[in-house]
Amino acid sequence: MAEAARDAERRERIMTEPKFGRWIGSLNKSARDMVRSQLRGNAAANAVKRSPLHRWLRGAFTARTFWRFLGIYFALNLLLVAVEYGVAHVPFAAIPDWVPEARFPPDTNAILLNVSGLMIAAQVGALGVISIALALVTIIAQRDSFSTDVQIYYHESMAFEVVASCLALLVVLCLQLLWPLQYLLHYLVDSRDALLFKLILVGAHTAWLIFNLAALAHFARTTLRFVQQSSRQMMRKQYTASVSAPRGMYQRIRMQTYEVGGLLVSQSIHRPREGEAPNFVAFGSAFLGESDVPELSSRFRREVALRDVRMAWVLWVARRWARRWESRQQAQAKALPRARWYYPRLTFAVGLDHPLHGPTHWCLRSGGEPLQPVERFVLRCAFRFGAVKDED
């Protein structure tokens, strides 16, 4: 009994601890934090830990694709164009002289053009090196028949991310030979060419190029290690300790936390009377019964799946909803002191990563008071649905 009580207290503490019960309370973030804390003290994982440069580059390249790189740069360019327009047209006498042309050499535009050409040559050369390396690895893979190692190589070398970044910078450099947004601004509003803003963008191009060259150095190092049998074995261990094992742990913890989430939320809402165990909230699949009332429904026009749940927001809604029911029950208990309490329940009838399509009732209420509009809105924001990917 004492062990069960301690276990229940531990589960309730997990729900109310700051690292889980922050204002967002993401289920996925909680699972990632638990995996990270487990691996931090694991001697086997620390023995094959990646280098600091690798960890920094992987963090910088996380979820970066060709279009995202272009989008980030386009946002920066728009910001600078807006600032250039404001500097030239804000009605203050001191601001138009903020960027005097006399401070720059007369051949600054020619210098910028030459710098851009050199950067384009550097990026084309980098893409050529990557193409040769990938061809070499493909030949080795076909000869030795280790397709799994090739997948590990692509992940460890960040080949897709490096190619995406280099291609994005190459496209940017080619387009910026004409400075299209700046030219459009000067054509439409008839303002002067402020070279300072072009220099800022060239500085961004240079920083991006250095970033790509650092990633290329890591790519070349990984490729050279890959052709050696001993280094390939170490790469397998690093991949298992850093990717494969944490991914499996993350999925299991995430699923288990979601399955017991209803119990955790229920225990943190209300202290039951002796002999009673209320279940205010339940997560998972359920059928629509006679006493169940749909509170939240959605029509999914394409196949989606539940990706994350803001558990702190669900807890906030469940507490408000349970308090209203408890106030009504306490008023009725004075009139009928021996009446038994029948606890209501909110059922979120959707499983994690389970494909959904068409009209779906995903929040059901059995008994209790109807949810208020603000509570429905918070719950819609708490449950994060995303498109079903091919690999799912």
Image (cartoon, rainbow, N blue to C red):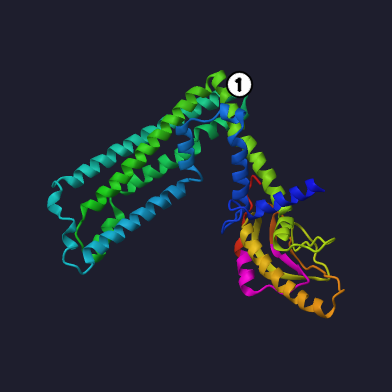
Question: What residue is shown at x 46% (from left), y 33% (from top)?
Answer: 52
Question: What residue is shown at x 78% (from left), y 71% (from top)?
Answer: 367
Q: Is residue 217 visible?
A: yes
Rendered view: 71 above or below 112: below
192 or 253: which is nearer to us?
253
Question: What residue is shown at x 65% (from left), y 56% (from top)?
Answer: 304
336 or 301: which is nearer to us?
336
In the rendered image, residue 391, in percent from the top left (x then y), is placed at 64, 44
Callout 1: few (<14), some (14-19), or many (20+) C-alpha neighbours within 10 Å?
A: few
- In the image, residue 378 lies in the stretch drawn in magenta: yes
In the rendered image, residue 182, in percent from the top left (x then y), is placed at 27, 56
Question: What residue is shown at x 18% (from left), y 46% (from top)?
Answer: 108
- In the image, residue 86 lies in the stretch drawn in magenta: no
100 or 118: which is nearer to us?
100
Instruction: Name the residue carrying label 1.
Output: 144
Tag 1, which secondary structure? helix
Left or right? Give the position of 316 relative to 224.
right
Going by the numbered disc 1, the residue's amino acid type is Asp
Q: Which residues are magenta?
A: 358-380
